[in-house]
Structures are given as structure tokens and as C-alpha cells.
Amino acid sequence: MSAYVNEPLDPDKHDRAAFSCGNEALDRYLKERANQEISKDIAKIYVLRRQESPTTIVGYYSLSAYSVETMRLPEQVVKKLPRYNQLPAILLGRLALHVSYHGQKLGEILLADALSRSLRISGEIGAMAVLVDAKDERAARFYEHYGFCRFHDAPHSLFLTMAEIRKLGINKGSGSF
């Protein structure tokens, strides 16, 4: 059995105040805005926690419905799609890992869960890609390592098509690629 569990954020259960990833904006989002976004159906937040510690947040990510302007996508992607001005997508809005867990490949577990969940969602509502706005160049390289491609008009904005996610062979049981 895995030492970690991914589950929806429960503001009454999970200790958001103790979370610190080293990025003030990501910490503040979890502590101050996440609950509002959940209650207003703006985003869904998922947390990673240790099996034996039901309240401690190891990391988190957020997912939202989104759309992407077709003209932003590379021609090799667009030529395989219907000719619409905008296409449905899923936004991986935030992904953060507590500082005490950096360097342990747990960001990969969070990303794998987010992509696996997005793929399932796309089977229900239709979404052609997962989009992310990386906070900096280091984060952009993290996403590129897993196959995300940069938009030509915004180098820290990246996408990964559902077709490519299917090819990744994410092992849902272990939360890894």
C-alpha cells in the first residue's frame, strides 16, 4: 500500500495553516482562497498526505475547466482537431509541495494524479488538453520533462494533449509515470 494518499481538500480536516512550499503566493492561495474557490465551483483542490497523517498536507494541486484559443496551438496539433475558435481544456492552476518534501519526487506523484484525474474528467465532459501556467523557468522545465509543450506566445504557459497523456502510461496505483 502506498505511503501517500491523494484526496479532495477538506478544509475541516486538512491543516492548511501549517503548509509552506517556499512560494508565498502558492501558500496564500491554499490558506486563504482555496476554500472560496471550492465553494463557488471555480476550482477543485486535491491534496497529497501521508497515509498515517490525515491532517498534514504534503502537497496540493488545483483543477478547473478552461478553454484555449485554437490559434495558440501548434499547427500539427490544430490540424487534427475540429475548426473552432476555442477548444475545451483543463487548467492545472496550481501545484505545490511542502518544503520538507522537496527533492523526493513527490511533485511527480501530484502531477501524475492531476493528469490521471484530468484524463478521467475528459472522458466525461470532453477536454483536449491540460494547460498550466508555470510560475518560473524552473517550473516550466519540470512540466516539459513530462511532455508538456510551451505556447509560442507565452513561454511559461504549457499544454499537454489528452492523446499524449494516454501515451504516458501513468500508473494510477503508484501515482507515477
Image (cartoon, rainbow, N blue to C red):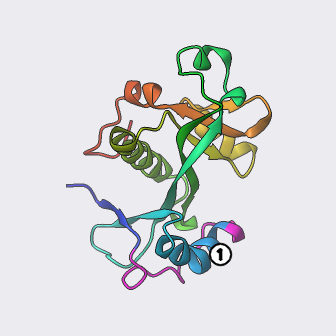
Q: Does 19 appear in magenta? A: yes
Mark 1 neighbour class, 10 Å CA radius: few under 14, some 14 to 19, many 20 or more: some
- In percent of the image, x 44 and y 71: which residue is there? 57
Q: Where is residue 12 shown, x and y percent of the image?
A: 39, 85
Q: In this view, does 110 lie above or below 112?
A: below
Say which quarter of the image contains residue 21: bottom right
Residue drawn 43% across the image and 31% down it: 165
Number of labels in the image equals: 1
Residue 24 relative to residue 128: left or right: right
Split into 4 quadrants, where in the image is the N terminus?
bottom left
Residue extending farthest to the right is 153
Q: Position of residue 64 (x, y in %)?
A: 52, 55
Q: Mark 1 points at which residue?
A: 28
Note whether 133 is above or below 77 in the view shown: below
In the rendering, at what x and y percent does residue 98 appear? 54, 66
Would you say 147 lies left or right of 8 here? Answer: right
x, y percentage for residue 41? Answer: 48, 67
Relative placement, left or right, of 20 versus 43 is: right
Query: For the point 30% across and 38% down, which residue is it?
Result: 171
Q: Give yes or no for residue 95 being in the magenta stretch.
A: no
In this orientation, which residue lies closer to the viewer: 38 or 124?
124
* Residue ID at (45%, 31%): 162
> Residue type at mark 1?
Arg
**Closer to the camera, 118 or 41?**
41
Among all residues in the image, which is located at the extreme left? 1
Q: What element carries label 1?
A: helix
Residue situated in front as seen by the camera: 13 or 120: 120
The quarter of the picture where the C terminus appears is top left
Q: Majority secondary structure of the magenta segment?
A: loop
Q: Quadrant of residue 112?
A: top left
Q: What stretch is highlighted in magenta?
A: 10-25
